[in-house]
Image: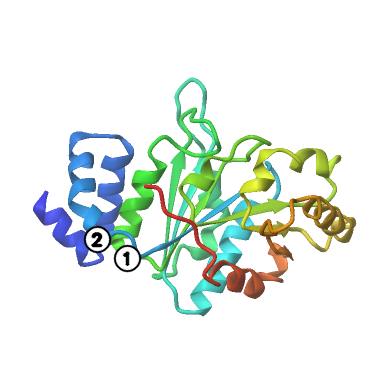
Amino acid sequence: MDDLVERFLKKDRRALARIISRVENETPEGREYLRLLFPHSGKTHIIGITGGAGSGKSTLTGALAAAYRKREKTVGIVAVDPSSPFTKGAILGDRIRMQDLALDPGVYVRSMAGRGALGGLAPTIADVVAVMDAFGFDVVMIETIGAGQDEVEIAGTAMTTILVNNPGTGDDIQALKAGIIEIADILVVNKADHPGADILVSQLRGLLSLAPAGTRRPPILKTTSIRGEGFEELADATLDGTRKTYLA
């Protein structure tokens, strides 16, 4: 165990992967690794990326990671995929969508199956993020499963929460007016090259105008993931010091 921790602290990615596996599976060794590594955590900026199914979270996550890499920041990504109700396994398709990052030594992508947990996360997500924090990534990004109106658990783990929206999904405001919009530190209208993007931005501004006086209103940014547009501005917004307490 000591040898694996030593290799981990020397930035050995195989050691990172093995420790994450033990933590994710909630083994006795995993709990001991958490105890040993916790003093090394607390320096990483944790970013949550959530939104409805099909909003483009995976592509956006990859494009935002590329923007961080231009700033020479190391990036860890935890992508949560929906799992089978029978086997609790998952296809892990989010990793497939991020293949462009696979050869970048400054990026580490870890897929996790949701295993039936509510809120778009996985049961041991906070522990896995704590391990990646201890490894020393500048930024750790958590991409949730497609989330619904009341699935707000990401706000308890992330310091900065991005809510991804896209036009043309029907009753956009009906999908946003419940609890999930209240956790957003940044609102993103993705697929901004599609018709209706400007209308959705206007609707979001109108919705935010109903908030009580003195309430912080999150910025609304537009991105087009497949073209890489808007991600420098989004990276700026996530790194401007807007952070919440990290609840591991």
Residue 18 at x, y = what percent?
26, 48
Residue hosting label 1: 136
> For the residue carrying disc 1, how many other residues have a C-alpha within 10 Å: few (<14), some (14-19), or many (20+)?
some
**168 to 218, vertically: above or below:** above
Distance of label 2 from label 1 (alpha carbons): 8 Å
Residue at which label 2 appears:
40
Residue type at tag 2: His
Looking at marks 2 and 1 on the same chain, the residue that comes earlier in the sequence is marked by: 2
69 vs 223: above or below: below
- Kindly identify the residue that appears in the image at 45 percent across and 27 percent down: 88
Q: Nearer the viewer, residue 145 or 100?
A: 145
Residue at the limit of the structure toward the front, as seen here: 213
Q: Secondary structure at mark 1?
A: loop
**Relative to 225, 168 lies left or right:** right
**Residue 241 placed where, x, y %?**
52, 70
Q: Secondary structure at mark 2?
A: helix
The residue closer to the viewer here, 42 or 66, is: 42
